[in-house]
Amino acid sequence: MTEKTEQKPPIIEVRALTKSFGSQQVLTGINLDVYEGEIMVVMGGSGCGKSTLLRHLIGSIVPDKGSIKLFNREISTMSEPELNDVRKRFGILFQSGALINSMTVGDNVALPIREHTALDERTIEIMVKIKLELVNLREHADKMPAQLSGGMKKRAGLARAIALDPQILFYDEPSAGLDPVTSAEIDQLIIDLTRKLNVTSVVVTHEMDSAFTIADRMCMLDKGIILKVDTRREFELLRESSVEKLSNQRDQLIRQFLRGDAEGPLTRCKEKSNYEEDLLERV
């Protein structure tokens, strides 16, 4: 899959992306390509910069330096109307589902269609049923968000994300807060929609079971830099390696994160950093 997609120009291209908030540098020199039709998983620990990277990709943050191209168009310098045109070509599943509580599930899905097209209500109704059927929620169109379980809210949010037939889908922690069975259902839904709709998917997550289930390629961030971008298989081999066979600290750090080990270079780095910061704050 990945070998084929890499022969095409990237649908998302990030170059030398840098971002700071005040004195805190959050992203440093990020370079990343995402190819048409693949599932790219962006992972890393809390505070590593993965959510900030996602916000740059959807145009809600402007970088301090660097370039972000979607569909071969530079979005970081676009005006708001230009950016809105690009946004019609991608969908977003937010971590909470972000449904409007005063609207039914069907009206939530219909909202972007009503906002961005001139279609008549009968056509919109048919489109909503199709989108809800794709996420197995067609029979729940008349329910309010408060009547849905956490997994159903995620699926409803996903139906809304695909309402305008996007070319790219962005997912922000799609498995967060879900039980293992529901999480597995969402994972399978991501795979199915990527294949059936021929979309490109970018999934931000720290859930390793989910990441290794859905990814074609994976990108790991730590402290605002990319440690590794490679195929899922290469990350699997790294996870399965013994620490003695890994010659550099970067690979040992990645392995620890992938395995969820309590001890290793990642833990030692955090302890050292926190101790130094605490000393400096007290001087």
Image: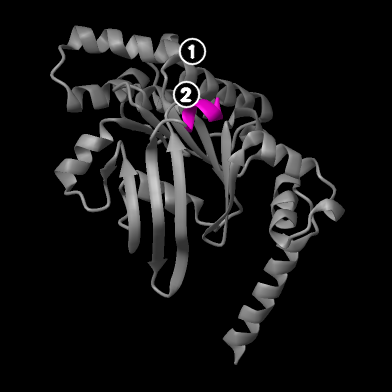
Q: With respect to residue 25, does 198 lie above or below?
A: above
Q: Which of the pair 41/242 is nearer the observer?
A: 242
Q: Residues within 10 Å of mark 1 (few under 14, many from 20)?
A: some
Label annotation for residue 101: none
Is 127 situated left or right of 1 in this image?
A: left
Dominant secondary structure of the magenta stretch? Answer: helix
Residue 2 shown in magenta: yes
Label 2, secondary structure: give it: helix
Query: Which residue is label 1 attached to?
Result: 136
Q: How many numbered discs sit on the rendered protein?
A: 2
Please state which amino acid type lies under the numbered disc 1: Asn
- The quadrant where residue 213 appears: top right
Residue 157 shown in magenta: no
Q: Which of the image's four quarters has the C terminus? A: bottom right
Is 13 situated left or right of 212 in this image?
A: left
- The quadrant where residue 198 appears: top left
Please state which amino acid type lies under the numbered disc 2: Arg
Residue 250 at what x, y percent from top left? 69, 58
Q: CA distance from mark 1 to mark 2?
A: 8 Å
* Residues under numbered marks 1 and 2 in contact, where contact means CB atoms less than 8 Å apart: yes
Query: Which residue is label 2 attached to?
Result: 155
Residue 276 at what x, y percent from top left? 65, 80
Q: Which of the image's four quarters has the N terminus? A: top right
Residue 212 at what x, y percent from top left? 66, 33
Q: Magenta stretch: give its range.
A: 1-6
Q: With respect to residue 236, does 136 lie above or below?
A: above
